[in-house]
């Protein structure tokens, strides 16, 4: 079967509901402080679901074992203190593949989100998420699963 939306984690492989598609949704389960003006790896340590044991919760890396293209989505939320800017970054093997710069406002929180479609080799390629802000002091990320989270969905070979 050709790779398409119907051969995806949401629809299965067209073989009656079984699928080898990799899907993961993870969040930061315990408080993490991001220093001011410092690009910092996000410590994703809790998987809502992880169909292929992709999450390394000690190295905070996502390493799929199935080669192919993945859609990767990241959302980072921090309290809006005195920052004027917050960044969310996705890196593959320490190379930036996506980022988003969110201007801070006057609300109680500021969120930055980005996504990318990336080819992963299924062995050594890994994804990490990063955040940066320019508060005058460190700021914690919001640890609620719906506020700071990352997902990977296998979309095809």
Image (cartoon, rainbow, N blue to C red):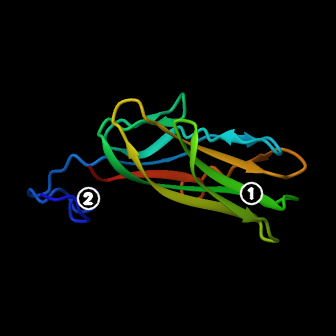
Residue depicted at x 35% and y 37%: 121
Residue 39 x/y as whole percent: 72, 42
Residue depicted at x 70% and y 40%: 40
> Residue 9 is drawn in which quadrant?
bottom left
SS of the residue under disc 1:
strand
Residue depicted at x 64% and y 45%: 130
Residue 10 x/y as whole percent: 28, 61
Q: Residue furthest right?
A: 136
* Front residue of this view, candidates 115 and 43: 115
Q: Residue furthest left?
A: 16
Where does label 1 land, which residue?
A: 86
Residue depicted at x 26% and y 65%: 5
Q: Residue furthest bottom?
A: 106
Q: Is residue 30 above or below residue 157?
A: above
Where does label 2 land, which residue?
A: 8
- Circle 1: is it few (<14), some (14-19), or many (20+) Cα within 10 Å? many
* Front residue of this view, candidates 26 and 132: 132
Residue 64 x/y as whole percent: 37, 38
* In the displayed structure image, the side of residue 68 where residue 142 appears, left or right: right
């Amino acid at each position: 079967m050709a790779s398409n939306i119907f051969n995806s984690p949401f629809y299965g492989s067209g073989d009656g509901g079984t699928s080898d598609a990799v899907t993961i949704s993870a969040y930061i389960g315990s408080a993490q402080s991001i220093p001011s003006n410092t690009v910092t790896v996000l410590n994703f340590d809790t998987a809502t679901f992880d169909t292929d044991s992709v999450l390394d919760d000690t190295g905070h890396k996502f390493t799929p074992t199935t080669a192919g293209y993945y859609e990767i989505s990241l959302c980072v939320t921090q309290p809006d203190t005195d920052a004027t800017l917050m960044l969310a970054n996705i890196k593959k093997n320490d190379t930036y593949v996506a980022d988003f710069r969110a201007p801070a406002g006057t609300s109680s929180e500021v969120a930055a989100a980005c996504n990318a479609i990336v080819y992963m080799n299924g062995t050594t390629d890994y994804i990490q998420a990063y955040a940066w802000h320019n508060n005058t002091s460190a700021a914690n990320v919001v640890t609620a699963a719906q506020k700071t989270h990352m997902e990977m969905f296998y979309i095809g070979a």
